[in-house]
């Protein structure tokens, strides 16, 4: 077996949202070793500028390469919408996968009137509408930015009545548009599923892109001959913020208390900025 097959897959998000992708990875690809990183010190990403998000992702991928990952998974819609192309370009040939396309593909197979709830940055980027309409130009798409969701989830306030009120407010305009499909355009939102289900009509199909993302990841691993056929190692968890806080919030989603390391990210220069030619003195 090639050594790279045994290497971990690097999975990252700003916080516990990526655990919805991690859980799908555990279900569908139990033989893979995983390195999970949550950038909790700089969360939420969804109200950041594109420049900030690209730089954060650059630092995460640089660190993951030092940890010898064989592939990077952006378990974060905001990073996938705003940084995927730049980062792929900078770190080529490392395989780097984003979540938007698999989510968009799944949605067009189910509906024609598609609502997307996402972070403000993802909604403004128009990434879902573009991806959906490229696949099916007849599909209609409405995107809503939901800035309050991520902080509420990270604070473990899923069952707080306030969260239900906020969710109803965000989704109301989509229901007025008579959507038949709703995409969770942020990996955190699957954690709110009981809240959504408590008021959404049954006619609205819920799409969790994480499920389809993992199928795309499996295909890519097969295609590249990178699937692990050896015994996997335990998942390694790292955060830029407080390890204990992350461990406490995530145990609810993982079903166990993870051991979490504090990671100090290396601040990286982009390969492009490094390769700026030196000024030659001619006189
Ligand atoms: N979970 C991420 C996403 O899918 C990021 C949320 C945030 O930090 O705002 O967009």
Image (cartoon, helix red, strand yellow):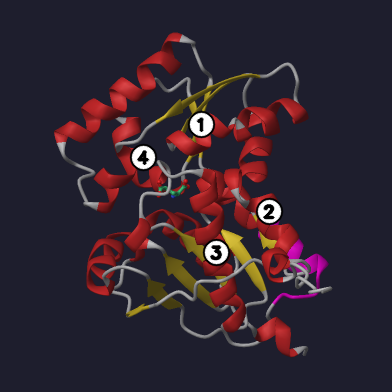
User: Is residue 196 left or right of 202 when viewed as pictured?
Assistant: left
Q: Earlier in the sequence, mark 4 or mark 2?
A: 2
In the rendered structure, find residue 157 and report the number of the disc placed on it: none
Magenta includes 206?
A: no
Q: Nearer the viewer, mark 3 or mark 2?
A: 2
Magenta residue span:
216-227
Give the distance between the C-alpha atoms of the residues marked 2 and 1, in whole angstroms.
Answer: 19 Å
Residue positioned 35% across, 65% down in the render: 254
Crowdedness near tag 3: few (<14), some (14–19) or many (≥20) residues, C-alpha within 10 Å: many
Please give the residue where the numbered disc 2 appears in the rendered image.
86
What is the quadrant of residue 194 in the picture?
Answer: top left
> Real-space Cα distance between discs 1 and 4?
20 Å
- Residue 230 versus residue 75 in the image, above or below: below
Q: Is mark 1 within 8 Å of ligand 1?
A: no
Disc with the residue nearer the chain's start (1 vs 4): 1
Question: Which quarter of the figure is the N terminus placed in?
Answer: bottom right
Q: Is mark 2 within 8 Å of ligand 1?
A: no
In this view, which residue lies farthest toward the front?
283
Q: Between tags 1 and 3, which lies in front?
A: 1
Question: Where does label 1 land, which residue?
Answer: 123
* Dominant secondary structure (helix, strand or loop) of the stretch shown in magenta: helix
């Amino acid at each position: 077996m090639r050594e790279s097959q045994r290497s971990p897959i690097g999975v990252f998000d700003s916080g516990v949202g990526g655990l919805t992708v991690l859980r799908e990875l555990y279900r569908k690809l139990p033989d893979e070793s995983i390195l999970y990183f949550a950038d909790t010190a700089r969360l939420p990403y969804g109200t950041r500028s594109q420049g900030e998000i690209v730089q954060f992702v650059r630092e995460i991928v640089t660190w993951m390469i030092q940890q010898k990952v064989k592939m990077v998974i952006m378990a974060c819609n905001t990073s996938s919408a705003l940084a995927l192309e730049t980062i792929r370009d900078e770190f080529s040939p490392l395989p780097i996968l984003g979540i938007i396309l698999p989510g968009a593909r799944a949605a067009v197979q189910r509906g024609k009137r598609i609502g997307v709830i996402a972070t403000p940055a993802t909604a403004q980027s128009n990434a879902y509408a573009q991806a959906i309409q490229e696949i099916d130009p007849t599909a209609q798409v409405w995107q809503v930015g939901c800035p309050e969701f991520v902080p509420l989830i990270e604070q473990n306030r899923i069952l707080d009545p306030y969260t239900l009120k906020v969710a109803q407010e965000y989704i109301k305009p989509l229901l007025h548009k008579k959507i038949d499909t709703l995409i969770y355009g942020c990996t955190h939102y699957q954690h709110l599923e009981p809240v959504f289900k408590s008021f959404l009509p049954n006619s609205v199909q819920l799409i969790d892109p994480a499920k389809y993302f993992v199928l795309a990841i499996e295909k890519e691993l097969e295609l590249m001959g990178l699937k692990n056929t050896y015994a996997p190692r335990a998942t390694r968890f790292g955060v830029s913020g407080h390890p204990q806080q992350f461990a406490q919030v995530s145990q609810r989603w993982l079903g166990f208390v993870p051991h979490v390391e504090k990671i100090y990210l290396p601040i990286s220069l982009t390969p492009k900025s490094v390769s700026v030619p030196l000024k030659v003195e001619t006189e």
